[in-house]
Amino acid sequence: MTNSTKTEHTNIKGEVDPHDLLQIGRLLTPEETLVQETARRFVEDRVLPDIAEWYDRGVFPKELAKEMGGLGLLGMHLEGYGCSGTSAVSYGLACMEMEAGDSGFRSFVSVQGSLAMFPIWAFGSEEQKQQWLPRMAAGEAIGCFGLTEADSGSDPSSMRTNAKRDNGDWILNGSKMWITNGGIADVAVVWARTDEGVRGFVVPTDTPGFTTNDITLKSSLRASVTSELVFDDVRLPADAVLPGVTGMRGPLSCLNEARFGILCGVVGAARACYEASLSYTKERVQFDKPIAAFQLTQRKLVEMAVIVNKSFLVALHLGRLKDEGLITPAQVSFGKFDNVRNALEVAREARSTLGANGITLEYPVIRHMNNLESVFTYEGTNEIHTLILGQAITGHAAYR
């Protein structure tokens, strides 16, 4: 769906490009197209050759962080401090290409830029910004975001992690669960209860009392580090707190940033599954002809192609609204709710077209399908986004 793709599939008048049915690439500016192509080339050159092995081994190649930083992909939608300052649409396109490679790579980019860098950029002191943001934008320092707890998922306000003042310092105790990048992070943005309300803390991970436990035996997001964070009397200086926000508005605004990256990213995963299915069915011969020539297979391919194009349009429209400062949390929930479930439907349909080959890592489909099961749940479950939209259209909150 980029200009490079259209070059490969020249759109002759009257013909349809199976990789861009609606010619959505024509709606992008030259700068946006360049960002998308840059991210796509990185994925093609540095991710796709090894992603099946990384997924199979359950590792994330953190050495690629500096390469992503060098391309301006980390915190790219933020201004200053070494960040690229791109548009929301460009950020969304980069997320799309990263997730076409693997959800683990888009998760890394989302967590680094939207969950770790954004709160420092939006709510941090100038000293905190200068200390961390340039290094994080360059990929020299990796961040994570500590909000979810083992007993506090969809209701983060019920968190138990707490911070108390002690002679001018803060003492942090508690734990966080399901934290992407936790085991490889240099800094954690941790949200905790205080006597003043929920506050955010910038916590270097080498602080005494801070430990992590990586979560293993995963069948999803295997090429991503997922960890528990543990705080045992972690002593922090007074200036570790984010001064610009108190209450749940802080972490929820970060989640909204990350959810935008997700609703764009999953379009890439869906596209990768559709394209793998299209290629395979045109080559796989049964009953003396390619299975793409059978009606049932064509129905599946058409459904996938339509979903991918519609989801891309939703992501692009929401990106334009975000760039204009008009987007609402409910609209972000619309994108996360619909694009993720549709991407998962595409992955499952694509898996069926590949038959037994669909369950091997030789093809990307089962990997995307398993990853999308996690994306369906994290950054607000599908049920929570349903209730957000329900409240938006009825005026009644049904959370409790």
Image (spheres, rainbow, N blue to C red):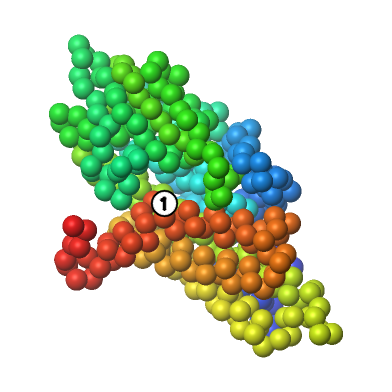
At x 31%, y 65%, the residue is: 386
Q: Give the total number of marks visible in the rendering.
A: 1
> Camera-side residue: 12 or 242?
242
Residue 240 left/right relative to 157: right
Residue 91 left/right relative to 18: left
At x 40%, y 22%, the residue is: 210
Query: Image quarter for residue 22?
Result: bottom right
The correct choice, above or below, for 39 with respect to 363 in the image is: above
Q: Position of residue 214 (x, y in %)?
A: 50, 34
> Camera-side residue: 2 or 352?
352
Quarter of the image that includes the C terminus: bottom left
At x 57%, y 60%, the residue is: 369
The correct choice, above or below, for 31 with respect to 175 in the image is: below
Amino acid, disc 1? Tyr
Q: Position of residue 188 (x, y in %)?
A: 41, 30
Q: Position of residue 241 (x, y in %)?
A: 28, 26
Quarter of the image that includes the N terminus: bottom right
Any part of residue 126 in sight: no
Q: Position of residue 397 (x, y in %)?
A: 18, 62
Residue 21 left/right relative to 135: right
> Camera-side residue: 376 or 241?
376
The correct choice, above or below, for 50 with respect to 13 in the image is: above
Any part of residue 160 in sight: yes
Identity of the residue furthest to the top in this view: 167
At x 47%, y 30%, the residue is: 213
Query: Image quarter for residue 364?
Result: bottom right
Identity of the residue furthest to the right in this view: 288
Q: Which residue is mark 1?
A: 378
